[in-house]
Image: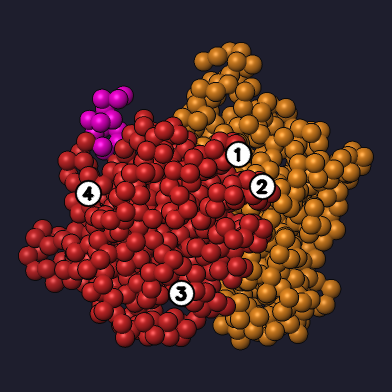
Chain colours: A orange, B red
Amino acid sequence: MSSDPTRARIVAVDAMDVRFPTSESLDGSDAMNKDPDYSAAYVTLRTDDAAGPQGQALVFTTGRGNDVQTRAIAALAPYVVGRTVDEICDDLGGFSRDLVNDPQLRWLGPEKGVMHMAIGGVINAAWDLAAKRANQPVWLFLASMTPEQLVDLVDFRYLSDALTRDEALDILRRAEPGRSARIGELLDSGYPAYTTSPGWLGYSDEKMVRLAKEAVAEGFTQIKLKVGGDIADDVRRISLVRETLGEQIRIALDANQKWDVAEAIEAMRAVAPYNPYWIEEPTSPDDILAHAVIRRAIHPIKVATGEHVANRVVFKQLLQAGSVDVIQIDSARVGGINENLANLLLAAKFQVPVCPHAGGVGLCEMVQHLSMFDFVAVSGTMDGRAIEFVDHLHEHFVNPVVIENGRYLAPRAPGLAADILSDTLKAYLYPTGHVWSERA
Amino acid sequence: MSSDPTRARIVAVDAMDVRFPTSESLDGSDAMNKDPDYSAAYVTLRTDDAAGPQGQALVFTTGRGNDVQTRAIAALAPYVVGRTVDEICDDLGGFSRDLVNDPQLRWLGPEKGVMHMAIGGVINAAWDLAAKRANQPVWLFLASMTPEQLVDLVDFRYLSDALTRDEALDILRRAEPGRSARIGELLDSGYPAYTTSPGWLGYSDEKMVRLAKEAVAEGFTQIKLKVGGDIADDVRRISLVRETLGEQIRIALDANQKWDVAEAIEAMRAVAPYNPYWIEEPTSPDDILAHAVIRRAIHPIKVATGEHVANRVVFKQLLQAGSVDVIQIDSARVGGINENLANLLLAAKFQVPVCPHAGGVGLCEMVQHLSMFDFVAVSGTMDGRAIEFVDHLHEHFVNPVVIENGRYLAPRAPGLAADILSDTLKAYLYPTGHVWSERA
């Protein structure tokens, strides 16, 4: 073991298969995900500096296949083990490019699916490590960088027809003057949240209405309901909630990719009288053109997507084609924080608000940093923006998100906040932890 | 072991990591793949009928990550093991939908990357098994089905804004009358090929020119060159080959995703005087809108893409947006033969020719069935169509493709032709086969 932290090296990339039996309560049930077991392919970049921080992040999955995800993460060890911590943390742009553009791994995507998510997990763990070494939460660590440092983190390949490096620099420079005031505002009063906790498709009407009322009482001004089952059921559920909450609360809807174009338009016409705020994932996340057609047809209901958008190239096109009113980045789908910087810059260029996807396990903890950084250093505004919040599984985290009066409080602990409690790791390790061995 | 073949069951899904050290000779080198080790994640659906056939297919990769691919295939065993062979082979549409639409596995894509390729590999192995049981090569097995049977194989989800089930039925019914004549034509004279063997980026000018001349002497009327390095180098290579071969030979170019939009247009303007036939993968395979812009700018040079297109939803949009002149399906990228049927039907609807990607290892063997089936039962024509051919690694197959006078002869052996020789499997197994252990 090295005792000199400046010479610390990465000695292992650990990937643990951690699963939560959420399917038993239908938490997380929607039109396409009937019975998810929320799971984490939990990444540790282990260093030989026992006294210093390790890098932690996770890739979220919904159960089966989490073992494939951990295997993909472990396969990245040769790219990481043996490098010094300094070398990685001082050039997170270069580290990201090395992994994303490796010519052999690239074949397995390119830049999509299991291998891209694995790369994103390792990159995010490196960000966690770098921010912990700087003794800052990731959002503040990012917000402490110059515009030049920030654009060096981004891979502009395939973006230049929509966003050049110089345009990105201009966006960041325009937001520089107010940074410290906005940091103060975040530390004082946090960032808006909306909640999906009431709206899972597997919940009874009574439970949905009760949870919706509770959400408003807790200070949320936007909730989200899952749709995409039978249209009559969708209409009944939405009308019930609208009647319960009145006109002032935003009700977003989420179809989780259930529909083709004509079905989406028909369903939205049926629920339009209840004034839904947006329809999320009306169809395939790959279908830029379909989203554009749906959006034109259902105006003024907004169209949102992003949690399954594979990479910045698809986000770019959704913006170029006018397919969406809201961009929903996810912390664990794309190639890590670096690619999400590209996504934030693209959204800023096209002046489309970013309302991140969260929930699952650990997604709230990780993605809050991106919205807060966006507020400080990119878009400079919270207008029309809110981070999804679902009140599940936060008790398993060392530094869980804190929601007060419908807002995320700014995290102050160093790093990305993805660290899972060691007791949880033991209990929920799949398939040998006691939670699973008892069920077997 | 069952001795009654009608009651045979799948007892295992084997996935072998087989790699060929092709990087040593720069075979396969291009602008994005500097040093591929062509590899197969080799799938076997093993049955308990020792006297009957097993199902074989492969997923092609370029080396590192092939272990992740085999792991993803192995993870599918619970979906397959224990099913009867009859149940799978009698409903290949249902089998495909079960795997592709599993709500938990779906999170890992959806329908893209490592998990989707694994699903495609298992589906293709089931097709191999079904065709072997019917004692037919896959192309003829497919061409023996009715239009109704064929559309039942296709998942029309996300396609209906461009192609409905009824439209697909119409396409197939219009092609019914001439089927047997076209089967005869294929058996007599095969299907056109073009060759990429001369054009790898790592080859010297002398080697390239010599191989190009040999290709024309062997009967090929189209060859392909890799581009995307320095523009001056590209111009020199293309002009040399054009000068050598004259104006009658088609010279296709392949940039392997190297460029952004403006770079692609600039490069094509530089080489336009040498009359290239198409530019393949000018930019990201996800970038529908960029391909459309490039295509309009470089007319009459054609635009081709597809080997890295993740699924039918992206193919659909490339056709809807007028992004491409040529669709290049790949046998091992999408969700197997079922999804490639959707791709063939979409191409037929939009009247765009399909010129499949092949090469790698085993891709020629597998994809020839799709073009031949397309000729018999979908498009009904070979006009503007040719299957890529690369003269690498065929000696490792039990039933290698046969090319004569620049054409693929119609395969007659039952199945998909993906079976690798057992000696090869032993020697090239990674990392323990002697080819690799000797290098270690």
| Chain hosting mark 1 | B
Q: Are marks 1 and 2 in contact (CB under 8 Å)?
A: yes
- Residue appearing at x 62%, y 23% in the figure: A87
Can residue B411 be seen by looking at this rendering?
Answer: yes
Query: CA gap, disc 2 to disc 4?
Result: 42 Å
Of the image marks 2 and 4, the number of the one nearer the N terminus:
2
The label nearer to you, 2 versus 4, is 2
Residue drawn at x 35%, y 72% is B375
From the viewer's side, name the closer residue of A72 and A408: A72
Residue B397, which numbered label?
4
Residue linked to disc 3: B348
What residue type is disc 3 on? Ala
Q: Secondary structure at mark 4?
A: loop
Q: How many marks?
A: 4
Badge 1 crowding class, 10 Å Cα cut-off, few under 14, some 14 to 19, many 20 or more, is some
Q: Secondary structure at mark 2?
A: helix
Which is nearer the N-term, disc 1 or disc 2? 1
- Along the line of sight, the residue nearer the viewer: B325 or B256: B325
Question: Range of the magenta residues?
Answer: B428-440
Mark 2 and mark 3 lie on one chain; the one further toward the N terminus is 2
Badges 2 and 4, same chain: yes
Residue position marked by numbered label 1 in the rendering: B231
